[in-house]
């Protein structure tokens, strides 16, 4: 557990995206600030689309420590950065902006966050992997798979024409990709990573009754509602299940470290706050 720091100048941070009201990031980051004694730090959610991103970045003064970015901003932010870490360039997207010395530094914490979430569940050396989807998170998944020792992955897509960004990222990462139709089987992968929105992978859950062996581990990036039908089916089949909350938690912890300069982030405090908020949301009428 890192030592608490005495409160310094008030600093601001936020998560940007569209839509953004559902984001759990403010809960996680605010819990981290409280645990670290950063009483003057604030973290909010701000609705922002691609068109509004340049202006919002330009409006961030010295009080701003950093920004978290969700869809559709991870790719759009790259031309607006002064410096970008190699993995964010390779993946083709940054989910974190840190303001430092008058510059905008870009990072991708989805990649180390995914590696950490898998490792926490004991998934460190899968023999093969299948990715559902071809968006920004799928690109991050390719980099995470590379980091845990794989050199190739099967990627299931709805529209091959929309996979150009993923194929370009694979080339930069040195990863071989086998593109297949979205309704192809997932039985030949040791690890299944679903990067598609809630509901889009439900039909895979129906195949859990298949007597043939399925993936031994499943990471579903959805975290609310949880568990998803895919996660339930995977657990029923005996697979290790990693939730989108696990990914969100670990990538947020890395963001806290980058923005505050304090390591390690107070992971347990962040986990408790996030789980409490998800439990609260589960009682709301919309659920």
Image (cartoon, grey):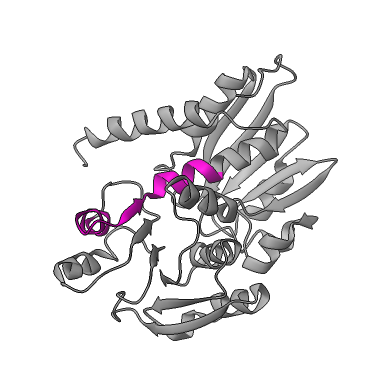
- Which corner quadrant of the image does residue 213 belong to? bottom left
Residue 119 at x, y = what percent?
49, 50
User: Which residue reaches farthest right?
Assistant: 101
Confirm whether the magenta stretch covers residue 8.
Answer: no
The C terminus: image quadrant? top left
| Lateral position of residue 232 relative to residue 278, left or right | left
Chief secondary structure of the magenta portion: helix
Magenta segment boundaries in residue numbering = 229-251
Viewer-nearest residue: 52 or 264 = 264
User: Is 71 rendered above or below residue 2?
Assistant: below
Residue 41 drawn above or below residue 72? above
From this viewpoint, is residue 238 visible?
yes
Outermost residue on the top side: it is 6
Front-most of 122 and 10? 122
Percent from the top left, x then y, of residue 98?
A: 72, 43
**Does 231 appear in magenta?**
yes
Q: How many numbered badges does the structure rendering display? A: 0
Q: Quadrant of the N terminus?
A: top right
Residue at 21 percent across and 64 percent down: it is: 205
- Which residue is at 75% across, 56% downward? 81
* Location of residue 67 by image quarter: top right
Specify whether residue 47 is in view: no
- Position above or below: 90 against 123: below
Q: Is 162 above or below relative to 220?
A: below
């Amino acid at each position: 557990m890192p030592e608490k720091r005495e409160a310094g100048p008030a600093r601001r941070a936020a998560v940007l995206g569209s839509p953004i009201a559902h984001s759990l990031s403010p809960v996680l980051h605010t819990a981290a600030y409280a645990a670290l004694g950063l009483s003057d730090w604030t973290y909010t959610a701000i609705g922002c689309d691609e068109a509004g991103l340049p202006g919002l970045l330009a409006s961030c003064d010295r009080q701003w420590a950093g920004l978290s970015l969700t869809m559709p901003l991870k790719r759009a932010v790259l031309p607006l950065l002064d410096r970008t870490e190699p993995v964010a360039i390779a993946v083709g997207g940054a989910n974190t902006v840190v303001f430092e010395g008058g510059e905008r530094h870009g990072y991708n914490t989805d990649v180390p966050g995914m590696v950490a979430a898998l490792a926490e569940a004991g998934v460190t050396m899968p023999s093969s992997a299948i990715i559902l989807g071809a968006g920004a998170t799928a690109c991050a998944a390719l980099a995470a798979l590379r980091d845990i020792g794989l050199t190739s992955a099967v990627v299931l897509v709805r529209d091959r024409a929309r996979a150009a960004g993923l194929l370009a990222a694979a080339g930069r990462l040195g990863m071989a990709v086998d593109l297949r139709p979205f309704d192809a089987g997932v039985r030949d992968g040791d690890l299944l990573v679903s990067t598609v929105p809630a509901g889009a992978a439900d039909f895979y859950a129906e195949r859990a009754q298949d007597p043939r062996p399925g993936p031994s581990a499943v990471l579903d990036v959805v975290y609310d509602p949880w568990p998803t039908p895919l996660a339930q089916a995977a657990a029923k089949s005996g697979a290790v299940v990693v939730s989108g909350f696990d990914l969100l938690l670990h990538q947020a912890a890395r963001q806290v470290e980058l923005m505050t300069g304090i390591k390690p982030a107070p992971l347990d405090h962040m986990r408790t706050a996030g789980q409490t908020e998800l439990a609260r949301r589960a009682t709301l009428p919309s659920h």
